Structure formats: C-alpha cells, structure tokens
Image (cartoon, rainbow, N blue to C red):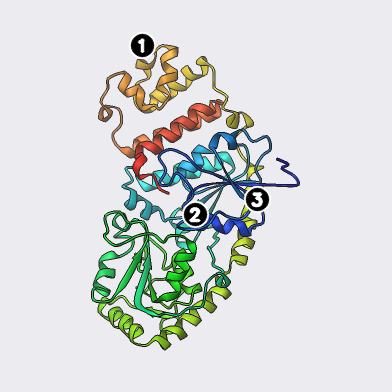
Amino acid sequence: MDAVSHPRLLTFNCHEAWVHQLEYIGYPIDIIDGLPGRYCQGWDLNVRPHPRGSRFISLEEATAAHAPYHCIITHNLTDLLDSKMIFGPRILVIHCTLDGLARQHGLKMDPGQLKAMVYQYLKWLGGHAVAVSSLKGRSWDLPEDIVEFGADIAQYPAWSGEIPAGLRICNQIRNRMEILLWDFHRAAFEDVPVRLVGFNPGMPGVFPSRNWEDLKRTLSSARFYIHTAHPELEDGYNMATLEAMAAGLPVIGNRHPSSPIEHGVDGFLSDDPRELNQFAKRLLADRELAGRMGAAARQKIAERFSLEKFAHKFRRSIEIARMKWGERLASEDYFSGRESSPEEKMVLLAKGGRFLGLARAFHDHMTRAEIDEALQPLEEIMRFLNLPRDRVIGSKEEFAQMVMEVSDALMRIGDSRSAFLLLRSTVKAFFPPTSLPS
C-alpha cells in the first residue's frame, strides 16, 4: 500500500448507510468486519451495497498494514479502542446524543464521566470528533465540527405514492421508544395504515428491506413518511427521513427545533396527535397534495443535503484530524503496545492504591507476576484481595474518576497496553457486550 500516492481510509462495519456515503470522498476504503460481539458480523446488504472502492479486512490485517492510513474513522467507543494499535489520524463520528445513548443502552455510569473519559482519550490520541448534527455535537460538548449526512435525489425513482399508506423506517424500536416518542406515534396513527420497515425482532410483520433497490421502490410507492423524535434525545430527522424526502415523500411528525420540514410546504408538523392524524388522512385522500409537498421536499434535499456537500465537509474533517494527529500527546510507543517494567507497575499500583484505599495491600499481598494480571482491569485487584466493591469505592462516579486518573498515569509512564486494557474493560463493564452502542 502506497500511503502517498494511494491514501486509504479505514473504517468499521457499522452504520452501513452512513459508511456508504464515504465513497463520495474519493479515497479507497478498508472496512473492518467480523469482530465478535457486534450487532452485525458482516456488511448488511439489506441496507446498502458495498461502497465503491472498498474492501473488507480483519482487524489483524488493518493492524499489520505496512503504511499508515490517511484517516481511521470510528463510530463508537468500541471502535476507538479496537483501533488503538493502528498508527494514524482518527475520527470519532458522534451518531447519537449522550443522553439518548445512556437511555437506550442502560448506561451504568454518569454520562458526564463518560464524556470526560472520551474527551481525555481523544486528546491523548490526537483524535477528532465529528457529529452528524448540531444536537448530537452539543450533547457531547464537541460542537466544533458538524457534518450532516446527505442524499442524492438522482438515485431514487420517480415518486408514485400509489399505496395509500404512511411509511416509517426504523430499527430496534423496542429499545428506543422514549427516543422515538413511540407512544405519540401510536396515538397519532392508530387508525391510519402505516408500514414499518426495519430490524425489529418481536414485532410481527415488520421486516428489513431485501436490498437497497427494494427500499427505494418501497419509498417511491408510499404516500408519506413519518418521523417523530424526542427533541432532547434525537434529531428532527435522520438518514431515512432524508432518503424519503429525496424520493419525493412529504414528511409528517412532531414539532422539533431541528426538523428540516416547513409546515404546510413539504410536510405537516404538530405536537397534537389528533391533529397529526387529520394531516395524515388528508394526504391519504389527496394524492396530488402529497405529490406537490413531496416535490418540495425533494428540492430541499438537493439544495441543503446533497452528498457533494457531505463530501466537501468531511474531507475538511479528515484534514483537521490529520492536523490534530500531529499534536497528539501519545508517543509512537503507545501504538506499538510497549509495556512498562515491573518496577514501573509497582509505582503505578502504589498510586492507584490512593484511589482504591489499598496501597498497603498491594505490597503486602501481591507479587510482581500478580500485578500484571491485576491490571486487566483494576477491578481484579478487588476480587484478588476478596474485598467487596462497596468497601473500595462509594459510587460509580468515583470508580470512573479513578479509571481516568490511573489510565492517565499509565500513559505517562509509557505502559500503553495496560492503559488500553483498562479503558477497554471499563467501557465493556458499563456497556455489556450485548448492548454495546453501534
């Protein structure tokens, strides 16, 4: 791989619809898949075809690459930690609000602590955060770079609206009912024909599309599209909303500060479910009105949410990431996985003991060989000494603060491997493998 004449991007198999946009950036793309504990083990062709210029590789192959990647694009904390051993500039894409993440996945630590941990780790790595919307950037206090996703109206067939029914595309509804204002959705459309499309185990009659072409046909035949969302937890639109608008569908939903819909022009908005119900029935009865509104929605996508705009902004984000990479605090040893000496680990554990209240126990009860095991993660120290967790720390917030301070000490003495294991195990402790954010 020639990093100068043929720079490549590296990303993870996650958020296929978003990743598919990267083909417009103009770089070849390596996509890591086959990782354990992930929502999807392989690329989901029901959502999108493989991006042009992409190839699929393992994490081991990416780590062994002989030339650095132009930029590593991660989508969550797990990706960020899994790519720790890969040398190169990196971006963390913020796909969800912090509060939305906490509620959907049952976050077991204070969101502020998680935010601080992410900020510290990005600063150390020289990483750059990019949010997909202003709301999501603000929720993480990382509002400096907002790159909204886009859609290409030329990719969608002409709208027909021949099926007198609404459409909503949504995955994992049962885990996101508060975020999606699902009670409001049900109240507004209880007697209105609505087709649901997406991955929703346990919801009879609800299935994903067979492929992207099938999804586009589904969009073109529906009369209108539905999007409802909690204004503090989710945006007033998502990628499916923009796809629907690009396909020529008017959009119906609740009023939301970030909604792209202009009431009465390219859709209808109301916080009264009875009023929204009447708007839906009006569109079902008047196909020509739906067509005029849908045409306005399609034009708005061309003007505000084109993929050319996405590509231009994200290329700039990549250059910012490359600049921050040059200002990173971590040395090259951090990415090579150098371990500290046993003496350094003894010093570190003495420091860690200040937070755990176990300084004397470290020296009285643990050999140097046992120290290595205890650092994977520090909670093993508590189990090794047979101490209940509640006798060591008073709260999850104290534990998170201890993790950040001790991992910082690990980084300062150059023990990158232990710092990585501690951060990763902490994230996995607070996000069980079956509910890791995607």
Between the residue at mark 3 and the residue at mark 1, the CA separation in whole angstroms equals 55 Å
Quadrant in which the N terminus is drawn: top right
Q: Quadrant of residue 50?
A: bottom right
* Local crowd size for mark 2, using a 10 Å CA cut-off: few (<14), some (14–19), many (≥20): some
Percent across and percent down for residue 152 are: 56, 69
Residue drawn at x 55%, y 42% is 123
Identity, as a three-letter code, of the amino acid under mark 2: Glu
Between the residue at mark 3 and the residue at mark 2, the CA separation in whole angstroms equals 16 Å
Task: Please report whichever mark, 2 or 1, sits nearer to the chain's N-terminal start.
Answer: 2
* Of the pair 309 and 399, the residue shown nearer to us: 309
Between the residue at mark 2 and the residue at mark 1, the CA separation in whole angstroms equals 52 Å
SS at mark 1? helix
Disc ID at residue 28: 3
* Of the pair 298 and 121, the residue shown nearer to us: 298
Identity, as a three-letter code, of the amino acid under mark 1: Asp
Camera sees residue 332: yes
